[in-house]
Image (cartoon, helix red, strand yellow):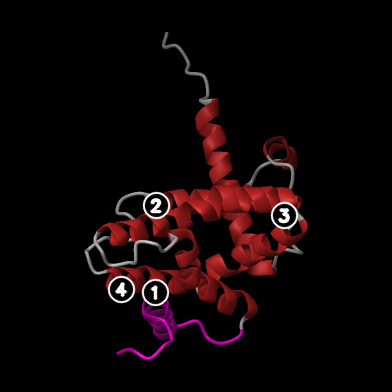
Amino acid sequence: MAESKKPDSSRRSERSRRAIYEAALALVGETGYARTTIEGIAARAGVGKQTIYRWWPSKAAVLLEAFLDVAEQAAQGEPLIPDTGDLEADLKLVMRATVDELNSPPYDAPARALAAESVVDPGLAAEFVGRLLEPQLQLYVHRLRSAQDAGHVRAGVDPRIALELLVGPLAHRWLLRTLPLTHAYADEVVEYALYGLAPRP
């Protein structure tokens, strides 16, 4: 008589986590953060709400984990910021990709929800920055340091400050909806950051 196999609980947990991530991102995009509930996420994912409460303390924590999962998948394979030796071209490429991501409906609502919750929840803010934003910002630091080594960026420039000249304007225009976020705008931000505002000789 063949021995029956026991259910693989780790595989079942992974399927449940994946379903919860997808449900959280979808619901926030469809109904907004305020109307998204743990109960709604559980129903959409096909799990009991106690399953969610066992793994996460709040819906914001669920959303953060879902975002981290998306970021980890996106980071696999090629580096997010290429190093072709042409700093301007490399930065324009990644800045345009950032514009596309920020303008993507599946990304927009969850990202705004996390940003808003981070303002009033210092613990979430620390996790949001430390686990999601800072690793992405360090990619700019690495690329700018490479450019310094190649003599394409002034030796005294602090890469951590310099990168904010690039990503800050995009985040400002996206978050406050001041003006359209476009590839042309991203290109100009790169040019202004690299070459400054003073007249060129």
Instruction: Give the numbered dot on residue 96.
Output: 1
Residue at image position (70%, 64%) is 116
Q: Earlier in the sequence, mark 3 or mark 1?
A: 3
Q: Secondary structure at mark 1?
A: helix
Q: Position of residue 164 (x, y in %)?
A: 50, 67
Q: Is residue 173 above or below residue 199?
A: above
Residue at mark 1 to residue at mark 4: CA–CA distance: 12 Å
Marks 2/4 in contact by CB < 8 Å: the verdict is no
Closer to the eye: label 3 or 1? 1
Q: Residues within 10 Å of mark 3 (few under 14, many from 20)?
A: some
Is residue 108 left or right of 137 when viewed as pictured? Answer: right
- Magenta region, residue range: 178-201
Residue at image position (53%, 37%) is 14
Q: Position of residue 113 (x, y in %)?
A: 67, 63
Q: Earlier in the sequence, mark 3 or mark 2?
A: 3
Q: Earlier in the sequence, mark 1 or mark 4?
A: 4
Residue at mark 2 to residue at mark 1: CA–CA distance: 17 Å
> Could you say which is closer to the camera, residue 110 or residue 122?
122
Q: Earlier in the sequence, mark 2 or mark 4?
A: 2
Q: Amino acid at mark 3?
A: Gly
Q: Which residue is mark 3?
A: 40
**Residue 93 falls inside the magenta stretch:** no
Q: Quadrant of residue 94?
A: bottom left
Residue at mark 3 to residue at mark 2: CA–CA distance: 29 Å
Q: Secondary structure at mark 3?
A: helix
Is residue 152 left or right of 47 when viewed as pictured? Answer: left
Q: Position of residue 118 (x, y in %)?
A: 70, 58
Residue at the extreme top: 1
Q: Which residue is mark 2?
A: 75
Q: Which residue is mark 4?
A: 88
